[in-house]
Image: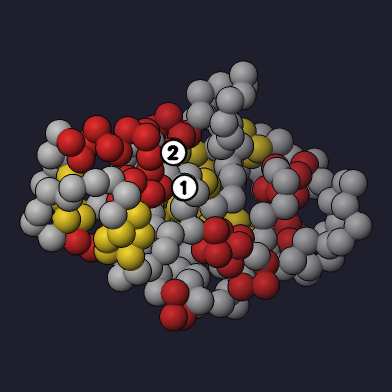
Amino acid sequence: MQETKSRRRLDQILSNYGYCSRSQARVWVQRGLVTVAGEVPKAADVKVAVSDVLIEGEPVECPEGILALLHKPAGYVCSHGTKEGPSVYELLPPRWLKRNPPVTTIGRLDKDTTGVLLVTDVGELVQRWTSPKHKVTKVYEVTVDRDLDPGLVGIFAAGELVLEDEEKACLPATLEIRAPREGWLHLVEGKFHQVKRMFASQGYTVTRLHRRSFGELEAGDLAPGKWRLLPLPSRTTNFSPPCPAAR
């Protein structure tokens, strides 16, 4: 999203932030639903600062951009218009999908995977937080179909595991074995179905997968299917990831 101090056409603001179309903005203004600096504007094409705009008495929602944490439930897919199942976007406010650009997920989780899923409409943030170069650690709670071999810890940590149909080895990953068939896997990258494929390469089937955290961000007591807004990182720090670099 653009800076709130710059002046833009009012109808463009209403459209870009998902309130209504540019053609509908004229009706909103005529009905007195929009004020600028406390006054009802005379037209929808006047140039104004976003910070001066109130819509039905409320300021524009998240004018600098949206960042939210969704506790993804099982059975939802991270895509639009698919027949594979309901979309995670159905769990978010419809207005967010009408923004320009609309919100998108920061990385994806499989349909049967639960846990922390971040959404934003800031493209630079998506690029920075999903790049392995920035080493944002994601922690997954993993349950498998048989007892875990302690030797897996060294295999995953070595950074030499090459998955099927891949040419490049996975980056080093930390596995904590917390129960005979349960562990926490710490990753700093996000290859396609990576967790399941890593365990499958060693003869295991993942029966449950839950993303516990994305950097320092956790769902906490947030119920599955619910979301909460997060502070948007500063552009002046190039959208620093939500955690220090991985070890």
Q: Is residue 74 left or right of residue 158?
A: left
- Which residue is most to the front? 42
Q: Residue at x 35, y 69 (%)?
A: 6
- Percent across and percent down for residue 130 are 61, 60
Q: Secondary structure at mark 1?
A: loop
- Vertical comparison of 68 with 176: above or below: above
Residue 4 locus on image (x, y percent): 32, 66
Q: Amino acid at mark 2?
A: Leu
In the figure, residue 33 lies in which quadrant? Answer: top left
- In the rendered image of this protein, does residue 85 appear above or below residue 47? above
Residue found farthest to the left = 38
* In-image side of 21 versus 193 (left or right): left
Label 2: which residue? Answer: 97
Quarter of the rendering containing residue 175: bottom right
Identify the residue under disc 1.
Answer: 100
Image quadrant occupied by the C terminus: bottom right
Q: Is residue 158 left or right of residue 21?
A: right
Residue lying at the far bottom of the rendered structure: 236
- Secondary element type, mark 2: helix
Neighbourhood count class around disc 1 (C-alpha, 10 Å): few under 14, some 14–19, many 20 upward: some
| Residue 86 position within the rendered picture, expressed as x and y whole percent measured from the top left | 51, 23
Which of these two is toward me, 48 or 15? Answer: 48
Is residue 119 visible to the viewer in this orientation of the structure?
no
Depth-wise, is mark 2 or mark 1 nearer the camera? 1
- Residue occupying image coordinates x 67% and y 72%: 133
Marker count (numbered): 2
Q: Residue 41 in the image: x percent, y percent?
A: 17, 50
Tell me the quadrant of the picture where the N terminus can be found. bottom left
**Furthest residue in direction top, as rendered:** 83
Depth check, front residue: 66 or 132: 66
Residue positioned 47% across, 34% down in the render: 88
